[in-house]
Amino acid sequence: MSKEENVINYYVICNNLKNVIRTGWKDWNVQRERIESVAEHIFGVQMLAIAMKSEYQYDVDILKVIFMLAIHELGETIIGDLTQFQIAKEDKEKIEHEAVHKILHSLLDGNQIEELFLEFDAHKTKEAMFAYQCDKLECDLQCKLYDEEGCVDLNKQDGNNTMNNKTVKELLKDGSSWSTMWLKFGQKVYPYDENFRAVSNYAINNDINVKKKTLK
């Protein structure tokens, strides 16, 4: 293939993520005219990374982080958006890594881009760990925004198998709202440092919709 065709093919493949709706929002029956796509999540997590780097002065290469986050959902162009409640981590990694390799193999810089994807997935370097925390917290912050809009009714969750998860059940039984449950779930499950935990706690204890606060 020509360089021009490689550029167009890669662009079109990635463009499909604009139409892949985040599975978690469908599982929880989020009632909203527009629900977040994977592409919108990628934008959101990149913006969160910029803000976290700015305010907490992390010693990370932020350009590398932004690049990592730009490609971290690349495999979902082929496998779709699979949640941790649908497939084992090891199984998802296998099919996702195969998908990423298939997408990137024809690009001249494909090996370098794939290495960056795998670095993110391993969560071992400081940039990868920072990016991973951003990825997880962003989802819970989006959840908080939907909750503030009143998009989810916990009494209308027929067929939602995620509610059978032990940690989810315990948090909801304790009286947590939908978004508070997810924010606390993140703190229990993911390796947040004190700064990410502080932002998560702020979201639990405050309205975070800037437009909503401006109108008060």
Image (spheres, rainbow, N blue to C red):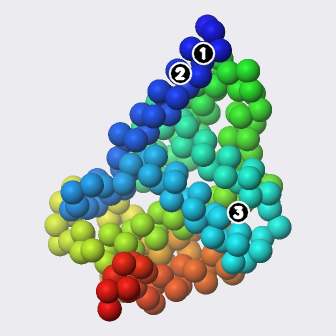
Given residues 42 and 124, the one toward you in this image is 42
Q: Is residue 123 above or below residue 16?
A: below
Which residue is label 2 attached to?
8
Which residue is label 3 attached to?
130
Q: Is residue 14 above or below residue 188?
A: above
CB-based contact (under 8 Å), mark 3 and mark 2: no
Question: Which residue is depicted at the point 60% across and 31% down?
Answer: 100
Q: Choose mark 3 or mark 1, whichever is in front.
A: 1
Q: Position of residue 35 (x, y in %)?
A: 30, 55
Q: Secondary structure at mark 1?
A: helix
Question: Which residue is depicted at the point 83% across and 67% down?
Answer: 59
Return the disc, 3 or 1, that comes first in the chain's sequence: 1
Q: Is residue 111 above or below residue 152?
A: above
- Tell me, yes or no, if residue 169 can be seen here: no
Residue 111 falls in which quadrant of the image?
A: top right
Q: How many residues crowd mark 1 within 10 Å: few (<14), some (14–19), many (20+)?
A: few
Rendered-image quadrant of the N terminus = top right
Q: How many residues crowd mark 3 within 10 Å: few (<14), some (14–19), many (20+)?
A: many
Horizontal side of 84 relative to 119 (left or right) equals: left
Question: Which residue is depicted at the point 47% across and 27% down?
Answer: 12
Q: Tell me the CA gap for discs 1 and 2.
A: 6 Å
Q: Position of residue 121 (x, y in %)?
A: 67, 47
CB-based contact (under 8 Å), mark 1 and mark 2: yes
Which residue is label 1 attached to?
4
Rendered-image quadrant of the C terminus = bottom left
Residue 196 falls in which quadrant of the image?
A: bottom right
Q: Tell me the CA gap for discs 3 and 2.
A: 31 Å
Q: Secondary structure at mark 3?
A: helix
Q: Is residue 126 above or below residue 9?
A: below
Q: Amino acid at mark 3?
A: Phe
